[in-house]
Image (cartoon, helix red, strand yellow):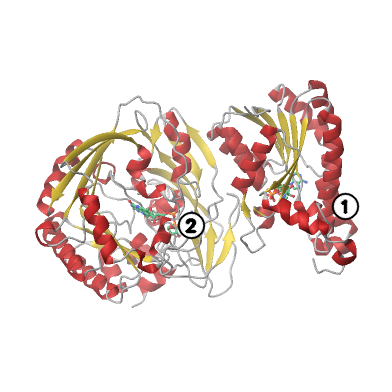
Amino acid sequence: MRPSFQSWGRYPKAEHQVLQLEWLTDRIPQLGEGQSLLPYGLGRSYGDSCLNDGQTLLATWRLNRFIEFEAATGRLRAEAGVSLADILAIAAPRGWFLPVTPGTKHVTLGGAVANDVHGKSHHVSGSFGNHVDRFELLRSDGRRLLCSPEENPDYFAATVGGLGLTGLITWVELRLKRVPGPWIDVEELQFRGLDEFLALSRESEQTHEYIVAWVDCASKGKNLARGIFSRGNHSLSKAPWVRPKPGPRMPVDLPGFALNPLSVGLFNSLYFHKQFSPRKARTVSYEPFFYPLDAIEDWNRAYGKQGFLQWQCVVPFENARETMKEILTRISASGLASFLSVMKTMGAMPPVGMLSFPAPGVTLALDFPARHARLFPMLGELDEIVAEAGGRLYPAKDARMSGRHFRLFYPRHEEFKKYIDPAFSSSFWRRVMSA
Amino acid sequence: MPKHKLERIVIAGATSGIAREVGRLLASRGARLFLVARDPAKLDAVAADLRARGAEGVHTAVADLASTTSHEQWWPEALAALGEPDGVLVAHGILGDAERARRDASHTTEILTTNFLSVAAMLAPISTWFEQRRSGVIAVIGSVAGDRGRQSNYVYGASKGGLDIFLQGLRNRLFHAGVDVVTIKPGFVDTPMTAHLPKTPLFASAESVASGIVGAMEAGRDVVYLPFIWRWILLVLKMIPEAVFKRLKT
Ligand SMILES: Cc1cc2nc3c(=O)[nH]c(=O)nc-3n(C[C@H](O)[C@H](O)[C@H](O)COP(=O)(O)OP(=O)(O)OC[C@H]3O[C@@H](n4cnc5c(N)ncnc54)[C@H](O)[C@@H]3O)c2cc1C
Ligand SMILES: NC(=O)c1ccc[n+]([C@@H]2O[C@H](COP(=O)([O-])OP(=O)(O)OC[C@H]3O[C@@H](n4cnc5c(N)ncnc54)[C@H](OP(=O)(O)O)[C@@H]3O)[C@@H](O)[C@H]2O)c1
């Protein structure tokens, strides 16, 4: 399906000329002076890292052919526009699974590499780039660079997490992971407060491959940082699996007021109490476990026309408890409750990219309708708290961090600049390189 | 139960945006496919994709389908590779440059040869083979543009309109042998052919058109508009009297 050529948060809005790529042999079109290009996958980035306002996007979604899949070893080579959903469709029935997956399967391989995406298994598997053996990088001067940790290792490190700025990734080769079947044994536990969250995380990192927590961002006082901790492992269940039917689609933009602090607070409270027992275990298929939001197509339209912002940070373990407490307190005091707030610990495996986001510590992801005047000042304060704690923000989910903060969060940006393709740029990059 | 099981299928013009998606649907069910296209690099890329997506076997032949004799080479190869095909899908075509075709006889000839003559020619041996087998389905991608001549693209329209009449006759003949002939008439589809056009809401995705084609082939339908709405659009368009139509800027 043709993507929207907006970002997933639909904020900020941008206008583009779109050039469609069809075949691996296609060349990068030559543009005039002062014009720039940016690859665009399925637009599942929230802010402006997948946008190039007033300029050109190189659409990769039709570069979506598999090149080779070795069902015996799990080695897969595919064009960069192949989505994780496409991969699961052929691999899962044959006992293979993605080594790392974000919370939606509608992202392309190129996008997964360019943001070095992470998932619920970060504490054991690291991020996407840790499982990529090679890819081809097509530069605007026509050079095709084979990149791996051995060949052109500098371009490899610049392109993983490189925000699409180093050239076009044309194909990717990665290693899938053997699994016993499509089922996941899940356990969900209520927790109250950060101490309980951290203790559960520490314990579960040893016993579970997948961990994540949902936090109630609307509650205050003694309920601050209450939530539901979910942990899972691939199940040995041999139950027959039926491929899920596509779910409903959000047919219209909901009016802006549909998700207001009251309804969000109510939702959060209901969600916390949906589970009456403090502990619940069951076996579910991988779809609802990894991709609960994919069940409603175009769910981002629930936030209305103005769109919404995501905000995701990671903070080192030594400061995590105090920093998260401070952040959650500010948010609940602001009354700008976040609808979906997700918290998890990240592990120690070093990412391969120069600008990769993941780092050991606690990561928190929030979303807010782009509506309240108070929102931007409050997020600015949160950025400062993260900076003081030695953490960083995730560019894939950012539409507004200051250039000063970006450069502080990503000290290797100077080194990275050498690898930027002179014909490539993005709204995000122009923003964080100025101001 | 579908009337035709599409387990062994020949696709001419297999690298087309629409045919690629048909190939994927069939591959995911484990079909065996014989693909014909002119560009070897594209053909290899499509074949590899269909293998990975579960096709039981993928065979290929490189051919210039603007030629009215290329089938002499690839049709026997297809029979050798698949044994008894259950069906054939003909998908190749060019939109051409309507402006150029107005003045340039060679371009007019190229459009008519690629879209109409080569198809009529290849269907001579193919239809005879299916007639003798006494089962199977032959599907050809025509176009809504073949339903009425318009100044903006009447050469392309004529090539598709010619196919329409040809396939009517073929359908009538093969009906008596238990073979179905399906005329597919897509409206605007988002493929390389229309890459230069702005994408209005009337555009359908290649995936949805492909699933309509597979359904129509399985059921052995006669004429299908894809999406369905085009049937009504064309019904209205065809009702306008010629004396009025010729005055319109179409
Ligand atoms: C519901 C939801 C949940 C999510 N959960 C997570 C999560 O758990 N963890 C996580 O890390 N992220 C998560 N994300 C973010 C998402 O995984 C990333 O933004 C991902 O990179 C999007 O991929 P895409 O194909 O849509 O790329 P786009 O958003 O279109 O582009 C992303 C970047 O990749 C570049 N790019 C795309 N294709 C190429 C190419 N072929 N060559 C070079 N550069 C290219 C673009 O230029 C851009 O900089 C989530 C997003 C959503 C909507
Ligand atoms: N897209 C639409 O809006 C639309 C609407 C109605 C009908 N149709 C019809 O649908 C069919 C498929 O088109 P599409 O939309 O999928 O567009 P497409 O991707 O451009 O496909 C056309 C295919 O025809 C092939 N072809 C052209 N000339 C050829 C030749 N001489 N020899 C071999 N192959 C040749 C092309 O091969 P190369 O890849 O090598 O160029 C290409 O694969 C066509 O018959 C078209 O007329 C399309």
Residue A345 vs A435, above or below: the answer is above
**Height in image: A236 above or below A360?**
above
Type of amino acid at the residue the image marks with label 2 = Pro
> Looking at the rendering, which quadrant does residue A362 occupy?
bottom left
Quarter occupied by residue A355: bottom left
Are tags 1 and 2 found on a single chain? no
Q: How crowded is mark 1: few (under 14 residues within 10 Å), some or many (20 or more)?
A: some
Mark 2 packing: few (<14 Cα in 10 Å), some, or many (20+)?
A: few
Say what secondary structure mark 2 lies in: loop
Q: Which percent across, then down, holds residue A200?
A: 14, 44
Quarter of the view holding residue A426: bottom left
Q: Name the residue under label 1.
A: B109
Above or below A316: residue B164? above
Please state if B64 lies on the left or on the right of A248 as rendered.
right
Q: Where is residue B147 in the image (x, y as percent from the top left)?
A: 81, 52
- Residue A221 lies left or right of residue B95; in this view the side is left
Q: Mark 2 lies on which chain?
A: A
Residue at position x 43%, y 64% from top? Answer: A420
Numbered badge on residue A251: 2
Q: Where is residue A405 in the image (x, y as percent from the top left)?
A: 27, 70
Location of the C terminus of chain A (image quadrant): bottom left
> Please, what is the three-letter code of the amino acid marked with disc 1?
Thr
Residue A68 position in % (x across, y down): 51, 36
Numbered disc 1: what chain?
B
Foreground of the two, B239 or B166: B239
Residue A343 seen in render? no
B245 vs B225, left or right, is right
Q: Pointer 1 and pointer 2: residues touching (CB < 8 Å)?
A: no
